[in-house]
Structures are given as structure tokens and as C-alpha cells.
Image: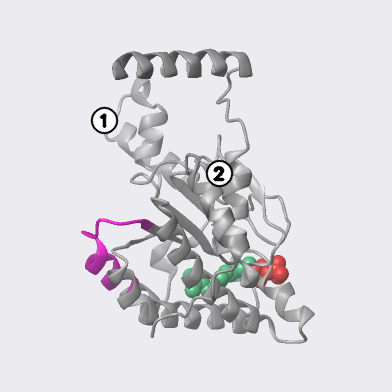
Amino acid sequence: MKFQLPPETAEVVALRAEVLARPLPAHVAIIMDGNGRWAEERGEPRLFGHREGSNSVRATTRFARRLGIKYLTLYAFSAQNWNRPIDEVLGLMQLLVEYLDLERDEIMDEEIVLQAIGELDRMPPPVLDRLNAMKEMSKNNPGMKLTLALSYGGREELVRAARLIAEDVKAGRLAIDDVSEDAMRARLWTSQIPDPDVVIRTSGEVRLSNFLLYQSAYAEIVAAEAAWPDFRERELLLAVREFQGRERRFGQTSAQLRVAKGAAAGVQAKAAT
Ligand code: FPP
């Protein structure tokens, strides 16, 4: 069953035109926060918020893909979320099962590649089996790479990578002098995905909460006021516009960046003559 998108407003049309006139982030990562509070404010159980949140996942995936985002990574379940009340954990697992069943056609129609990162062997078989089937089915699609972070933790990922490096050194497959950023990256769950350009966190909080700790070194962090169940195209566009207004210096000064930009523009102008 296709998820029905809401009708477009004039504000969204104008925002989209504004955002499309500037370079887009290649990789958008989202910490989907505020489901529980959203539900509690309405006198509903927390799972009601997660259910609405899964509709935001479906809608945001479609908006991001249509906007031209190449990589979308969603923090769907952290390694620490296992410590939540058992009913909430089971409810979230059930929502994941439903999501994977409902989105199969949409993912294939939109030519999306579905991937997952995290301690996937901890996911219950009904989730893991569907996930593996969807990964296999979508792996040759040419479109946006959608990555679900499941039982994911940045510290857990770094400890795992350190252990893999230690094993390779011990076995003589890697020299200590070759322990480098590249060697580290190759052992992260995200080895096939570029670093995020922007990490959006909904519900007004500004915290990474163990998400993509290594990969977010130079990501812009954008706090979106909306709770995740209220996140739609307008909120995505506002966050991307905020990203586009930031100056990314990667350790350089503003003056250095201006010189580099001028030089690049000069090369382009010369090539055009
Ligand atoms: C954080 O909100 C959200 C989560 C822990 C789970 C996110 C899950 C979904 C969006 C739905 C299922 C996922 C997919 C991919 C279908 P919170 O509960 O911590 O909110 P709170 O801070 O208001 O309590």
C-alpha cells in the first residue's frame, strides 16, 4: 500500500525552488527523535508516536529521493534502545517488520537501495530475514541509498573496528604503520557510504547520542524543532536550507576558502572560453 503524501503548499514549492538553486548535501543523516513525547502530549502510548514516526520515515524517504539526495541514513534503533521497556522494544520490532513489508514495492519503484548498519545479528529473525531479502532485492537499484541504523552505536562500531584491526595486525595481515584513517574506515559498518554532510536531529535536541561518531567529524548538525512524527517535506527543506547557509571550513580559514573558490571559478571561466 502506497503512503499518501499530503498536498503541496505554496511555502513548500518556494522552499524547494530555493533549496534546489544551491548545492545539495550528498548524504543526509537523521536522528529521529521525539516520538515518545509527541504521543505523550496527545495522551497516547509511546508506541502511537513510533507508529506515526514510521509514516515520517516513509514520507521523508520519498521527499529526499525526489529532492536528489544520494544517501539518506536514519537512526531507527540504537544499541542502547534494547534497554527500553520490553513492550516498547517489541512494538518497535513489529513496526520494522510492517515497514519492510509495506515499503517493498515503494523501494523498488523508487529504485532505492536499502542497506543497514549496526549489530544486525541482534535483530530478531522476522526483522533480519525481511531486511536481508530487501537488501538483496534492491542492491542493483540505481537510486538513493537508504541506510537504516539498527542496534547501532558509534562507540560499538569503533570498538569493533579496533578489534578487527588488532586481529589483522596479530595475524600479520596489517602492519602497524598501515593503521590509518583508511584502514579504520574500511572496518566501519559504513565503509561503503560517504561521511554525512549534515546530521539532522528532530525535536529540538542537539546531541549525537552515539550516532556516526567517527563519520560526523565535519558534519553540520541541524536541530529541527519538529518532533519526528511531524517531520515532512517542509521540515526537510528547512533543515537542508540551514545546512546550505553554513560555511564548511574543514579546518581551514574563511579567507583560505575564498581564495580556493576564486581559483576554482577562474579555472572554470578559462575552460569555458
Ligand atoms: C526516538 O524517539 C525514536 C526511536 C528510539 C525510534 C525511532 C523509530 C521509528 C521512527 C519508527 C520505526 C522505524 C522505522 C524505520 C520504520 P523517542 O522515543 O526517544 O522520543 P522521546 O525522546 O520523545 O521519548
State the image coordinates of residue 80 (x, y, percent, origin top left). Answer: 60, 62
Where 158 sits versus 126, above or below?
above
Q: Which region shows up in magenta?
A: 130-145
Q: Amino acid at mark 1?
A: Gly
Can you tell which quarter of the image residue 103 is in? bottom left
Would residue 177 be found to the left or right of residue 57 on screen?
left
Where 23 sits versus 96, above or below?
above
Q: Residue at x 40, y 64 (%)?
A: 120
Give the alpha-carbon distance from disc 2 to disc 1, as whole Å: 28 Å
Judge by depth and name the residue closer to the eye, 240 or 186. Answer: 240
**View quadrant of ligand 1:** bottom right
Tag shown at residue 57: none
Tag shown at residue 213: 2
Give the mark nearest the N terminus, 2 or 1.
Answer: 1
| Callout in the foreground (2, 1) | 2
State the image coordinates of residue 179 (x, y, percent, origin top left). Answer: 38, 27
Judge by depth and name the residue closer to the eye, 21 or 162. Answer: 21
Question: Within 10 angstroms of label 1, few (less than 14), some, or many (20 or more) residues?
Answer: few
Judge by depth and name the residue closer to the eye, 190 or 16. Answer: 16
Would residue 156 be found to the left or right of residue 43 on screen?
left
Q: Is residue 76 magenta?
A: no
Number of numbered labels in the structure image: 2
